[in-house]
Image (spheres, rainbow, N blue to C red):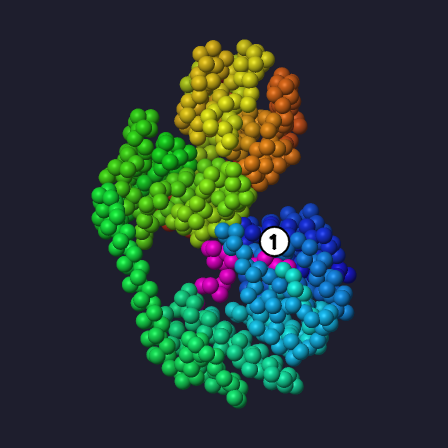
Amino acid sequence: MPRFTLVVPVHKVQGYLAECLDSIVRQDYRDFEIVAVDDCSPDASGAILDDHASRDDRIRVIHLTENVGLGRARNAGLAEARGDYILFLDSDDTLDPGSLSAIAHRLDATDEPDVLVYDYVRTYWNGETRPNQRAGVLRAEGTGAGPLQDRPELLDLLQVVWNKAYRRDFVERLGLTFPRGYYEDVPWAFCSLIAAERIAVLDRVCVRYRQRREGGSITGTVSRKHFDVFEQYDRVFAFLDARPEPDGLRPRLFRRMVDHFLNVLDKPGRLPRNARAEFFHRAAAAYAARVPTGFRRPAGSRGYKYAMLERDAYSALAGATTAARTQRVVRSRARAAVNRSKRSAMGLYYQSQLRAPLDENLALFSAYWGRSVSCNPAAVAEELARLAPQVRRVWAVRADAVASVPAGVEVVRVGSRAYWSALARAKYLVNNVNFTDALVKRDGQIHVQTHHGTPLKTMGLDQRKYPASSHGMDFKKLLERCDRWDYSLSSNRFSTTVWERVYPCRYVSLETGYPRNDVLVNGTAEDVARARTALGLAATTTAFLYMPTHREYQGEFRSRLDLARLADELGPDVTLLVRGHYFYSSSPQLADLRRSGRIVDVSGRHPVEDLYLAADALITDYSSAMFDYAVLDRPIVVFADDWDVYRAVRGTYFDVTEEPPGPVARSEDALVDLLRSDAWHGAEAAELRAAFRRRFCEFDDGRAAERVVRRVFLGEQTPIPPVPFAERSHAPHPAQVLELVERA
């Protein structure tokens, strides 16, 4: 039997679950098992558990057929525990490295106590950590273990179950299980400490307790279920009353109970407004029923609240709370008035438009900071025209890009009065990046964040670890922009888990596929032929599309390849289509080579999907283009000559040289040899591509834009199921188009 069983209940944590599991399996102490309980999670959490279990036989997964809540999910895991000791870990938290070794050593040193209490820190989205304010309680004198009355101050700790190790035979003998309802930790935590004959402590941080910016705890939701706290403390005091009275514990437990009731009352996001008075009176009744003889109230404002409970004086407490809140509102309004006085005339115009009603049939689109009409927003706009033509589609475009906008597209110039009016009054806002910081998200507005690629490189909050790539990014402002999102699109579960972790806000993830990739699935032979003709490609020409990614340490586009040499080596029947990243302006190097006729510079061409349709194969380094191009099931070659540097400077989510979409060349010579052979489009390349496609083209079945329009604009709640992978088609390869032409 293992030394430890770690019970991990899981529900809607796909963005954090892998990190939680990895923090356990990477411990240097190996004698443990994980019993992970999928509490009928509606996201990809169950699949993540199964994937980890397939790679580590110490993980056992229980899939519940209905959502039963945290306590009963823990009970399901508890019933399967085989370890000498049971530990609980919430699935968005992590174990600190070396924790299990430290716990095992302390258990041995204290001769197998019933309960071992260890320390934790709170962690925040901005990288901040805050220590347990009562950690001094864990600074043990000597190495022994004893009952709670020897160390009653343990009751002052945060009473949760995940900061303790419990001897399994002690738990079974006591018959401990978790009750239904909110605050299910309360009876387990208190009753186990009261009953334990031997409690030991470990003065070491073992758990990193994540404070999720977007919430995630059910106790942080407005609900009458917070009344469950009364039943939980009924269980604690019934347990205490049924046992010999431990010296001095009742006043401490009473104080913890009252503090907990007041904490629920003080938190604005817990009780419905019309339930606050009822909750207070229930708390006052519990106070009167359980106040110990001779109990002395604490001093200060806390003592005042105790006194109000003692008198059941809700009106007095509510009046004092309202007065304090009014002072805060007055100060806030004063600051707002000062800020308003500083606004420009255009800002005042925007404010006036914010007071006008929303236009229910107006959608404002933008892409790449107003640089073009393209990407996912363009595909959504096109489908919107088909399914809901009554919705007016307007694009926000920079003044210097208006000339390149396709005919028939309605445009407002970024910064103009028409732009601010549309921003204020549009019911729908659709973008693949963020709108201006000045945007005020109105009640009733719907903001769709489409993104513009599957993330290989680190994004969002993960960029904090790579300051050379974030260029002084203000992450607080970034998340304030993300707070405006209502929907976040994803083309695969991999992306969903990344977005939810690095942009921790209260949006809904829509796993629709990327709308821009619909044409890669639905494109016809005529579409492929048209795309190639537009580029001047002969029917027999092999076209390689070279799309390197942006490097923050490179100010302008400089190809890492000797493009002239590559063109010469590949011969006259090969054309190189070269597209620099959109962060780069026109390159002198590309202009010179273009004049020589050896390559075609396609950096300014939109949409990029036409380039994908035209190309026989893709050459890239670390660009997200590989994920989109893979939808076509055409060859992809990875040129990774500076992978180690790029990964160290930018940070990445996986090793593309180990899990590539096709053959990998680590030098220019190797790339030339590869492209001059058949290996770039051979059987091994196809095998790599197939695995890559199954992972990253998961939802790209040609109906992504339709899914978005039906859910967001038409309000349909039943999603269109993805086409099974084996049944999907894609636009034909140029060679197939040539074959069709020859037959005709």
| x and y percentages locating residue 534 in the rendered image | 41, 18
User: Could you tell me which quadrant the N terminus lies in?
Assistant: bottom right
Residues in magenta, as a range: 206-223
Give the residue displayed 37% in from the left and 46% down from the top. 447
Report helix, strand or loop for mark 1. helix
Residue 140 sits in which quadrant?
bottom right
Spot the residue most to the bottom.
293
- Which one is in front, 661 or 355? 355
Give the residue displayed 48% in from the left and 79% down from the top. 298
Give the residue displayed 62% in from the left and 16% down from the top. 676
Q: Using the rendered image of the protein, determine whether residue 640 is visible from the camera's viewpoint.
A: yes
| x and y percentages locating residue 706 in the rendered image | 41, 40
The reply, left or right, for residue 715 in relation to residue 599 is left
| x and y percentages locating residue 263 in the rendered image | 46, 71
- Which one is in front, 654 or 473? 473
Is residue 220 located in the magenta-colored stretch of the structure?
Answer: yes
| x and y percentages locating residue 494 in the rendered image | 55, 43
Q: Which residue is mark 1?
A: 20
- Which one is in front, 560 or 637? 560
Amino acid type of disc 1? Answer: Cys
| Crowding at mark 1 (Cα within 10 Å: few <14, some 14-19, many 20+) | many
Is residue 408 located in the magenta-colored stretch of the structure?
Answer: no
- Which one is in front, 104 or 3? 104
Give the residue displayed 56% in from the left and 79% down from the top. 252
